[in-house]
Image (tube, grey):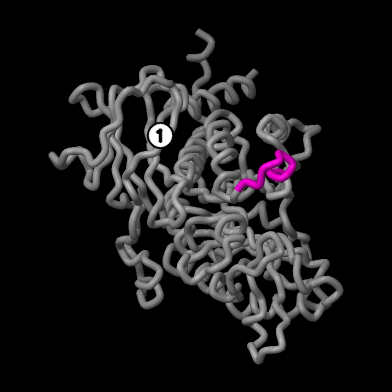
Amino acid sequence: MRKILLMWLQCHLLVAPLSANCPIFLTISLAGKTLHDACLEINWGPDCYAPPEWIGIYREDPSVSNLAPEVHISGIQNRTGKRQTPFKLGKLHFPGGWDRHDAEQAVSATDYPKGKCLPYYAASYNGTELLTIDCLKIQPNWLAHLKDAAAMPLKRLFLPGTHASGAFITNYNKTKSLLVKDYLVAQHFDVWSQLVFGIRYLDLSVGYRNTDSKDIEVDKFWVVNENMFINPLAGVLRDVRRFVELSDEVVVLDFSSFPIGFYKHPEVYSGLFQLIRQELGDVAYERNVTSNEHCADRSFEDLRLVGRQVLLLFPTQELPHPENESVLLCPPWQRFSTSYMNISQTLDYMRLLFSKRPEGPVQDDGWIFHAVKSIEQALNNNKLLTAKERAALINPKVNLWLTGPWGFNANVVAMDYFSNTNLVDLAIHVNAHKAFLASNQKFINLEILSR
């Protein structure tokens, strides 16, 4: 009976704040060709009891300024919704030393325990009465400041992630291929920016570019997506290293596949390991291989105490000896993907996974849910959807379904174009509630529930 009541309380605490009012949040539209052209979207819900009369978009915090809104949106009737605004994102600047260029030279960066708003605000109103404010924000230090969550095993945390994390373009004008631009790029932002926005899990597929040129060995390893080379790997690894040094955060780095140049070439796997060790060896967690330690059982606090806050997931069976016994590499976590599913099948699959029944496929270890739609799945629908079109179909649905009790059972959720959702804020909200319940479980007076 006690267990049932605690579960009820957990669900109530998770859902109540979202249904008690009408939350709003800003996301980045997937309609623009480039990030600069992308427009802001205003979202409200889920299941607002009473939607606001109107919502304004501002350049400054409307609670402390008298500026008129840049965009005025009225006629809101649905309890849950999303509307694209004409407000373009333009060039982003991260404050406090968190711009990638600034961070390369900085000794430290500003600590933002609650995140830091960029100059994009949304506010909801009934008449002139201000109801709710939100902003587009960076979250470079969120996990380090959830103190009660720091002692929880990583497998108990909700870690927001990106799928095909290294499939980004920083300069669209220099990229001639429409195939890459429209179908293979999977993120608006580079890996550095993803981490600054609050992403804590990165998914990397790696290929080996064995050309006849005189490139040094490290330059032959590239991030790939859909069997195409996208970006050099070394730069991505350096961004991860620099970020954990500045932020004091944990990053889970998952080397999920090796589709080009690795098959039956153990020396290529060995070369990749040497690159990983060179770039991340000083910040990667060292597991206890003699006790067959499960890295997902470690907490953020465990990793921070030893100053090694990058968790490397790698299929060690592919490596030759002795690299396959390296203390730097953790066995891969369970992965589940919706790549070849339609929306209805995705819902059924999430019901199976996130209910976490004892007989279900999710075991008591780290696990990763890739909420994505593949090119092949789009072809099965007789239309070749772009990567942005595919993400626009699945992201809002999955994001909505995770706002209920399923979010409480999530471990890692990874998406294409995560910036089309409020995945990071959702994960922070869930982890805060998990930490509160874990720290106060022994002190909850259940007598009030029986009266």
Which x, y percent locates residue 359?
A: 81, 32
Q: Residue placed farthest to the right in the image?
A: 264
Q: Nearer the viewer, residue 115 or 290?
A: 115
Q: Nearer the viewer, residue 147 or 85?
A: 85
Residue in front for this viewpoint, 356 or 210 = 210
Query: What residue do we see at 76% from left, 65% from top?
Result: 259
Residue at the spot of label 1: 83
Look at the image and give the residue range highlighted in magenta: 377-385
Residue 382 belongs to magenta span: yes
Q: Determine the image quadrant of residue 78.
A: top left
Q: Is residue 21 among the parts visible in the rendering?
A: yes
Looking at the picture, does residue 267 appear above or below residue 337?
below
**Residue 181, how many percent across, how many down?**
55, 60
Q: Look at 36% across and 75% down and name the residue there.
A: 107
In the rendered image, residue 213 lying in the magenta stretch gets the answer: no
Residue sitting farthest toward the top:
451
Quadrant hosting residue 224: bottom right
Q: Position of residue 38 (x, y in %)?
A: 41, 50
Q: Residue at x 44, y 28 (%)?
A: 81
The answer to whether residue 369 shows anywhere in this view is no
